[in-house]
Amino acid sequence: MDTSQGAARAAIDPTRFAQLTQQLSLGAVEFKETSGSTNAELADLASRGLAGHLSVYYTEHQQAGKGRLGRAWVTPSGSSITVSVMMAPGASVPTEALSWYTMLAALAWSRAAERVAKVPVRIKWPNDLLAGEFKICGILAQMVPAGSGYGVVVGTGMNVDQSREELPVPTATSLRLASSHAIDRTQLLAEYLKELVNLDRGFRQVSGSVDLPLPGFEGRSLREMASEKLATLGHDVRVEFPDGSTLEATAVQLAPDGALVLEDRNGQRTNVLAGDVHHVRRADGKYA
């Protein structure tokens, strides 16, 4: 499917998607050909009581999305999977654990992409996915009111069918480029939601604990599974803070609150939370 030579991209098939996901007990499912921002539009539905837990909003062409720190997040029509999911687990998951839904989404995408596209995918802390050393997916999670508490809208943009020329930066890639073959986007989207639903079910069953084994995942905890996939661990990294200061140290582990634990050459450890940083890059300049 060489779209650079004019061949039409295969659209996500809503009917087939519904068939593939009918056993998942999803909430409301909204599909729009064009969306300004799937996160903003799903959050609006949730605020009006029209989107509960596991409601899904996806589009073929997002035109005004925002990524982390307000960066533009625009996708060429039919080239990506741009989807937002409402996660409103209620009292089963404490508010302070809701930030871990970013990692749930990252794990779900890595498992889905590896199964459908046969491409190894790893997590770059705090909210990107990598194929090799190239970014393939970005994740943006935002808290929203949900009933008497809070939920999280988790938006993801997976690069699926872009050519090299369509990618915005040299550090990005797509599943088509990484796998050298066409990807069924309908199947891939359904597989992502299947993995996300299963991870969410286990997370709720352990009341949002990141260290208890998740039921159905071979005795592994969420933190253990996320750490196994985290490409950032074991590397020297350079952290840039919003005030212009920097920190160079080795990423050694993922803390229970989701912070990246850094250790400098003197053995001094610093916990860095996603909301406190502007950018995290390997000290050797590589994206991962």
Image (cartoon, helix red, strand yellow):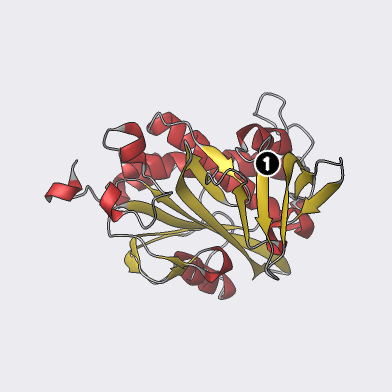
In the foreground, 253 or 204: 253
Q: Give the amino acid at mark 1.
A: Asp
Q: Position of residue 287 (x, y in %)?
A: 52, 46
Q: Quadrant of residue 191?
A: top left
Q: Quadrant of residue 151?
A: bottom right
Other-residue count near label 1 (Cα within 10 Å), few / some / many at <14 / 14–19 / ≥20? some
User: Can residue 195 be seen from the camera position used here?
Assistant: no
Q: Residue furthest top?
A: 218
**Would residue 198 be found to the left or right of residue 40 on screen?**
right
User: Can residue 133 be seen from the camera position used here?
Assistant: yes
Give the residue at x 65% y 31%.
Answer: 228
Q: Position of residue 216 (x, y in %)?
A: 65, 29
Q: Position of residue 283 (x, y in %)?
A: 62, 46
Residue with the mark numbered 1: 236
In the foreground, 22 or 250: 250
Task: Count numbered badges in the picture.
Answer: 1
Give the residue at x 27% y 33%.
Answer: 181
In the foreground, 282 or 40: 282
Give the residue at x 63% y 63%.
Answer: 278
